[in-house]
Amino acid sequence: DKGNHRHFMQKEIYEQPVVVAQTLRAYLRRMENEVAMPDMDFDLGAVRRITIVACGTSFYAGMVAKYWFEKFARVPVDIDVASEFRYRDPVLEKGGLALFISQSGETADTLAALRHARAADQIIAVVVNVPTSSMAREADLLLPTHAGPEIGVASTKAFTCQLAVLAALAANLARAKGLLTPAEEAEIVWHLSEAPAAMNEALGHDGEIEAMAHLIAPARDVLYLGRGPDYPMALEGALKLKEISYIHAEGYAAGEMKHGPIALIDEAVPVIVIAPSGPLFEKTVSNMQEVQARGGKVVLISDAEGIALAGEGCMATIEMPKVHPLIAPLVYAVPVQLLAYHVAVAKGTDVDQPRNLAKSVTVE
Ligand code: F6R
């Protein structure tokens, strides 16, 4: 039931504050100011390497998590798409943690990769939205997302719930490694708890984003740029746009522009820059200005501070609330999804069932 929404995708975008809060409740003890995990029969603090494997949007959630695991828990992380991982003969030290991320829990390549890791004596952790799925059944550590059934083929609420679980896992890992003081842990709990309200605020910009869809809809190509955890968000933005609006889109690490893709820039290529204010902001803005100097039309997604510093000269800006960097990917997912959604609606494509795509990819 779509309720009063036009599409399942739109409904699922709007459900995010509620389902992310629901998911966080399973991984945070608010009263104690602690992060929490289900019981496990291995020592999380002894994990020395993490291998993340997933496909599509779930892979991008994993890419964001890599920044968190390295930053908070100082654990080296390897990440690959399942279709590559399963055939490349990866070097897996016995006792490593292999982490699989999947909405459906049935994606053929990810499931095969899981069995490959099992055979290589890895501890198997899975982040899945379907608790009865094959991946859930084969896990040593099951970390469910509580997004509820996701009907739209383009993943939205499952993605932000994956991010919520992965952020909590990063904090748990950091604590198990003795790298988190109680005060730091309390701060993480506090910031994560703020995510649903900030996502709600982001949804408040829906009308504005709808109004700018006509700026993107006629484009043949669109670029998305970001740095740090916003780099995978750029990849996710491009994937969302291409899969539902059929516009060719690419996500790039902002610093890679000058190594090739900047040759594509002209007035006809809109460039979506995902850049919350913070330590990486200046760097991304200088890449953005290189784009503008070549006639590129920029849509800047940032907060008030970022827009005040760099919004001038942009074709459009989308203002997000000022949030802690840890929760920025959850909040910035919202405008990225809404932009793809409204461009697709403007183009009249089948938003919930894009051509050639299946919700669950159970064949290789
Ligand atoms: C994109 C999308 C796909 C899935 C991918 C993995 O919007 O939905 O890229 O993310 O097929 O599916 P799961 O997460 O079920 O393994």
Image (cartoon, helix red, strand yellow):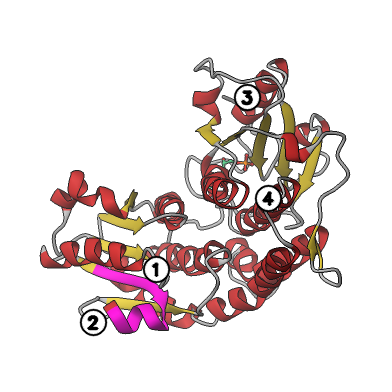
- Alpha carbon separation for disc pair 3 and 1: 38 Å
Residue of label 4 = 174
Q: Is residue 129 visible?
A: yes
**Which of labels 2 and 4 is toward the front?**
4
Q: Which residue is mark 1?
A: 346
Give me the C-alpha separation between circle 4 and circle 1: 45 Å
In magenta segment, residue 304: yes
Query: Between disc 2 and disc 3, whose residue precedes?
Result: 3
Q: Is residue 4 left or right of residue 272?
A: right
Spot occupied by residue 335 in the image (x, y as percentages of width and height): 47, 69
Q: Is the residue under label 3 in contact with that under label 2 (CB below 8 Å)?
A: no
Between the residue at mark 2 and the residue at mark 1, the CA separation in whole angstroms equals 27 Å
**Element carrying mark 1:** helix
Residue at left offset 77%, top offset 46%: 143
Give percent across and percent down for residue 316: 30, 77
Query: Mark 4 or mark 1, which has the lower sequence index?
Result: 4
**Residue 312 shows which numbered tag?**
2
* Along the line of sight, the residue nearer the viewer: 125 or 175: 175
Ligand 1 located in image quadrant: top right
What is the CA distance from the residue labelled 2 to the residue labelled 4?
A: 40 Å
Q: Residue at x 56, y 56 (%)?
A: 352
Q: Which residues are magenta?
A: 298-309
For discs 4 and 1, the disc positioned in front in the rendered view: 4
Amino acid at dot 4: Ala
